[in-house]
Amino acid sequence: MRRVEGQVLTIRCTSCSSIFPTFVFSGDTDMATAGLETATSLEPTSVALGELTADEFRAGYESGRTLFAERISRQYGADFVALSVPRWVQGPSGEGLSLEEFRKIFKPASPVYDCPRCGGEAPVISQQSPAEFLETGGQLLVASSIALD
Ligand SMILES: [Zn+2]
């Protein structure tokens, strides 16, 4: 059993107003999150977590996550897609500020996703732990080979 951690992000499209969840894995090293993947379904709204198969991993990043989403769709009987992040919103630059001033205004870069419904831009509107997400009625589907800390 592989133990994983991460956060559920809720995304809202600025064009069609669809709201949907996705997941970011976190780990101390790239190795800790290698081969982990997530896919999102709009109907019903849910997010699935799992591990790439050996074939999916070998297919390369983009093809592998598409194959993963197709497999998850068959498994759960819904349309899951692997969301992509075409751009990031950078935090404030801190140019001209002292380190102390910069610490007060610092914000990490934030991903802007492609809306799977209309292709619009969908920035992050909230971030929750998996437990908080489940408590608020979120649907989180976790593959049997992994355990969420
Ligand atoms: Zn949209």
Image (cartoon, grey):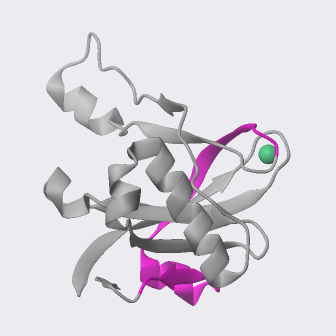
**Extreme-right residue of the structure:** 16
Q: Is residue 78 left or right of residue 105?
A: right
User: What are the residue bounds of the magenta stretch?
Assistant: 118-143
> What's the residue at 55%, 89% (across, down)?
135
Kindly indicate the quadrant of the structure image that contains residue 102: top left
**Residue 90 coordinates in the image, percent (x, y):** 42, 28
Residue 26 vs 117, above or below: the answer is: below
Task: Evaluate whether residue 22 shows in this view.
Answer: no
The reply to whether the magenta stretch includes residue 137 is yes
**Residue 70 coordinates in the image, percent (x, y):** 61, 64
Q: Quadrant of ligand 1?
A: top right
Residue 56 vs 92, above or below: the answer is: below
The reply to whether the magenta stretch includes residue 142 is yes
> What's the residue at 63%, 54% (across, down)?
11
**Extreme-front residue of the structure:** 55
Q: How many marks?
A: 0
Q: Is residue 99 left or right of residue 110?
A: left
**Extreme-top residue of the structure:** 96
> What's the residue at 29%, 12% (across, down)?
95
> 59 or 25, which lies in front?
59
Q: Quadrant of the N terminus?
A: bottom left
> 133 or 115, which lies in front?
115
Q: Is residue 35 left or right of residue 129?
A: left
> 75 or 103, which lies in front?
75
**Residue 142 coordinates in the image, percent (x, y):** 46, 83
Task: Evaluate whether residue 120 shows in this view.
Answer: yes
Q: Quadrant of the C terminus?
A: bottom left
Kindly indicate the quadrant of the structure image that contains residue 136: bottom right
> What's the residue at 31%, 64% (across, down)?
54
